Image (cartoon, rainbow, N blue to C red):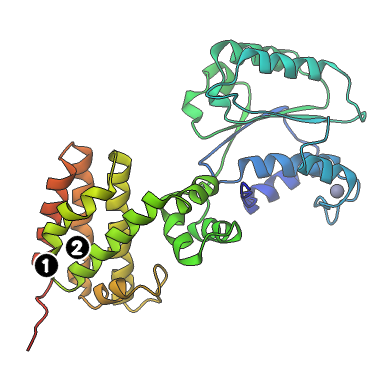
Amino acid sequence: MAAASTLPEGLVRQFSHIIDRDQMSQAYIFAGPAGAGKKALALWIAKRLFCTNLQDGQPCNECGECLRIATGNNPDVLTVEPDGQSIKAEAIRGLKDEMGKSSVEGHSRVFIIRDADRMTASAANSLLKFFEEPLPGMLIILTTTAKNRLLPTVLSRAQIVQFPPPSWQAVADQLANAGVARSLASVIARLTSDVEAGTELAADEAFQNRLNSVLRLTGLLAHADAMAFPFIQTDLMKQVGDKNDQRQVLRMLALVYAEAMRRSCGQEAQLLVNNQDVAQLSTQSTVQLSAGLDAVLTATGQLESNVGFQADCEQLVLKLLHGAPAVSSN
Ligand SMILES: [Zn+2]
């Protein structure tokens, strides 16, 4: 089950005002990262326009109209999504045929085109014809995570609404609601704001192995154990495939150091709360942890300038070990 994004409250308020004043435009572009609530807001607007039982200006989510919109069964609320990698002209023409028909229920019609940046050039051109010959009561909402890939001719004909990224707490809550363990959800929510992608990560064994490897490395670093150096080759390297995996490892290590630093400043534990290795790392001084976080970020930069991952990590581990006090055995 794909988890639904939460509604962006600020934008809901704005659109409430706009609809109350009957000032809706005919075309909007909802731009923002995955998980920001673009589709959720588009459906909220459709419900707000169609609901037969508004509660304090909010859709009731219970009437026939609201339920049909929620389940994708309202003939006046049509959604087009990419078929594979792209949205082809036929899909837009199909929409146009629907648009040409008079409204089934005699009121507004809402057309939602998701990932509109994936429209082929001919699909985008078909869409422009709608903009040139708008029908009364027609509302088109395009959603995109890559606004700069939309044609200028499309961009210039619609109102652009920029969505803020969701907070990691909101993403973690949604992941937890989708059945992801809390401790894992709080890590994943910092790696992606896309709940669907996050749910997939949670189920990915290779991802879990990478995280566990990073935590074992954390344990070695927390104890200033020189075995952290060979660990890169004997363990960590086996958990990474492509560059995205490599980035993810450094990102997780940065999260661990940032969390340890927060705790060493006296703040409440927020991430990997029950992990002993992170707790041990948090006993290092704030200055050391801050230098450690800096080193991880430097390593991240070097990875992007094509330093090999193993060499990059080995160099990093030497820095992190050098900065940590040796654990005294006497
Ligand atoms: Zn309703």
Residue 178 visible here: yes
Residue at the image position 54 percent from the left and 12 percent from the top: 121
Asked if residue 18 can be seen in this view, the reply is: no
Residue 319 lies, in percent from the top left, at 11, 60
Measuring from the top left, give residue 325's x and y in whole percent.
11, 75
Q: Residue at x 31, y 52 (%)?
A: 251
Quarter location, residue 143: top right
Residue 261 horizontal side relative to residue 190, left or right: left
**Of the numbered discs in the image, which one, if any, rests on residue 292?**
2
Disc 1 crowd, CA 10 A, few/some/many (<14, 14-19, 20+): some
Q: What secondary structure is marked by label 1?
A: helix
* Quarter occupied by residue 183: bottom left
Report x, y in % for residue 209: 34, 55
Q: Nearer the viewer, residue 225 or 45?
A: 225
In percent of width and height, residue 316 lies at 14, 55
Name the mark on residue 323. Answer: 1
Mark 2 → mark 1, Cα distance in angstroms:
7 Å
The residue type indicated by label 2 comes to Gly
User: Disc 2, disc 1: CB below 8 Å?
Assistant: yes
Q: Is residue 86 left or right of residue 235?
A: right
Q: Residue at x 40, y 76 (%)?
A: 268
Q: With 203 as the anchor, is 242 left or right in this view?
A: left
